[in-house]
Amino acid sequence: MTASTARTPIDRLNSTLWKRYAKVTMCGIAGVAGFQDIDNAEDIVHKMSCALARRGPDAEGITRLDGAVFGHRRLSIFDLSAAGIQPMTTPDRAISVVFNGAIYNFRELRPILEAAGHRFQSQTDTEVLLHGYREWGIDQLVSRLRGMFAFGLWDNRNRKLFLVRDRLGVKPLIYAVLGNKIAFASTPRAIRQSGLVSEIDPQAVAEFLEFGYVTDDRTIYQGVSKVQAGTIMEWSDGRLSSRQYWSLPVVDEQSRVTFEDAVVETERLFLQAVKLRLDADVPVGSLLSGGVDSSLVCWAVSALGAKITAFTIGAHGDPLDETADARQTARQLGIRHEVIDLSPEETPSIDDMANAYGEPFACASALGMMRVSKAVRSSATVLLTGDGGDDVFLGYPEHRYFQMAQNLARRLPPGSGQLWRALRPAIPNIGVLRRGAHFLDYATGGLGSVTRTHPGLNVYQQFGMLGERLTSAVIPQRQIERSLASARNLLTEFLPYDRRTRFLGEYMTKVDGGTMFHALEGRAPLLDQELWNFAATLPYSIRLHGGQLKAILRELARRRIGERVASGSKRGFGIPVNRWLAGRWRRDFEETMSHSLLAKEGWIRSGPVLEQHRKAVEKGWVSNQLWYLYVLEAWFRNEMPRHEDHAAEPVASVTASTRSAM
């Protein structure tokens, strides 16, 4: 194929895409089922709804059903009329749904349902869920959906509750089983504020100290769980079951797809994904850094003829500032561009971060995401982002590193792992020797070596920083067996592991929490399921073509934007928290940890923590482990009084009909 044929995806786009739009309501959802006292159930849902207010500031709706109560907080994006109010229920009250997300292909599904005799009362994608369930059942309905979503659906005739989460886990969905009852919500905090649960899970605290986030395997509260990505949960009469309706396709190393084929098909799917995410009845903006992914999103917007504004956060004088590159890209693409300047003195609030995330969350770039969202919200309600490209197209340095280790492992003889581990203690843990030793760890031990290498809970244990509640904590991920067999398939094993942990626990959480805290809907074209279905099957030699990270997207950027962007380094909205804890946040850290709530409740020991901080300040750089403690302390201080104060308040006496009309 020639370069000229690579331009044809724009021309080949189905013309109906220009007419297609998604009536979307991003929001917070909540509900209960199995409660005998319906008044109590409604009060519980109202409390959860209050905790979700920032996710949906435009309206609150609560509906009593026969056997369940649903609640909804609305952020209006499309169909701003009362017809789009949720919870949404069929006229015969047989089926009801609360929905958070966007079904991008609902316009394709609606005519099929209308031809089968279903009559629609709104212009929302939500209503497709009601009629689609009645026509096809839950499994066939979900298999047809293209988008990001989390929803609860109550089937009154069969007394069943379905909880469904999208394929990639873009939207969160949490639940708690309480005997023969069940509650669900968009965040763990909402369930906690309902009064149904209260105890902190020590294993989740240990996991947070290991990773800086809580994985999808658990939540910070005991008895509360996360619906897994690509999963349908089914509850009926106190019995709960789950089934996975989608999994990422496996790589096809025998594929005959060429690099050129991969670039052309990626361009076609990517343009389609951007097109589907451009429609809204509110202003749409796009993030623009100096990097490949956000630049490609803005190129696609321009190529599709859309008129939106690209936003760049300026940090004048900071080494992380990318304003100049972004301005050059915007001029080249001919799109409107706005730089939002943030002065170096404008320090993000650690308290806002504790408020924004329903669990402890220490991804430093989340502070940048929150700053961006707050600044953009006055100009746009929908924001296109470049998230997702690194994960499926292999854009992180470890992807190339692990491929190299995997290739070496396939050449090593049996017994190499045991031999290396016997020699390993003699290798100095410094500089290039340290990096070389880690590489051999991976090449002989595989995923088990990868999960043991990074600093985490072991650092707290080494310096005696853990309190009695965590002294016996063990991280299961550090118990993964090391073997040469694993090393020979390292990248293949690492990718699903990384998706279950960092991708869901950190990346998806960061964007959803940071944007929704400021009532902003984030849409990521590079998280499109059809794009992932295609890219995930591509051989590593194609995705890392010529040893280049994210080679397909870089080649697309080279053809459509230019070498400057294609060869640029990975960018992000970085926040130098490790420097700040040694500088501008130093005294606050010392004061906070000297009167630590974590220490008071037996989670940590303040003395060793302060000693490690003192040593770090002398070097001008504080480790992530101390940053995690700072975040955890802020979250505990924010969360504990919040729950106690809320529980002391009388429950507001508001009727369901009044709430639904709000």
Image (cartoon, helix red, strand yellow):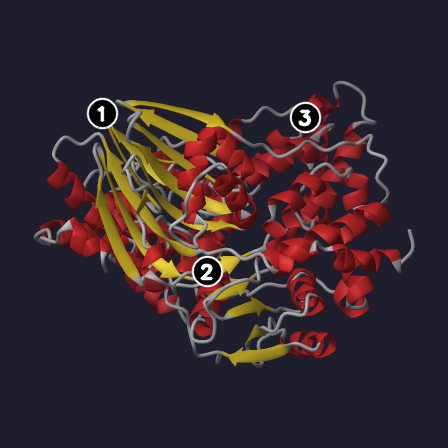
Which residue is label 1 attached to? Answer: 179
In the rendered structure, the answer to whether residue 17 lies left or right of residue 638 reads: right
Question: Quick one: label 1 or label 3, which is nearer the N terminus?
Answer: 1
Depth-wise, is mark 1 or mark 2 nearer the camera?
2
**Distance in Å between CA atoms under marks 1 and 3:** 41 Å
Could you tell me which secondary element the residue under label 2 belongs to?
strand
Question: Quick one: label 1 or label 2, which is nearer the N terminus?
Answer: 1
Which residue is label 3 attached to? Answer: 486
Which residue is label 2 attached to? Answer: 521
Q: Amino acid at mark 3?
A: Ser
| CB within 8 Å, label 1 to label 2 | no
Dot 1: within a 10 Å radius of its alpha carbon, few (fewer than 14), some, or many (20 or more) residues? few
Q: Amino acid at mark 2?
A: Glu
Q: Residue at x 81, y 25 (%)?
A: 412
Depth-wise, is mark 2 or mark 3 nearer the camera?
2
In the rendered structure, the answer to whether residue 420 lies left or right of residue 341 reads: right
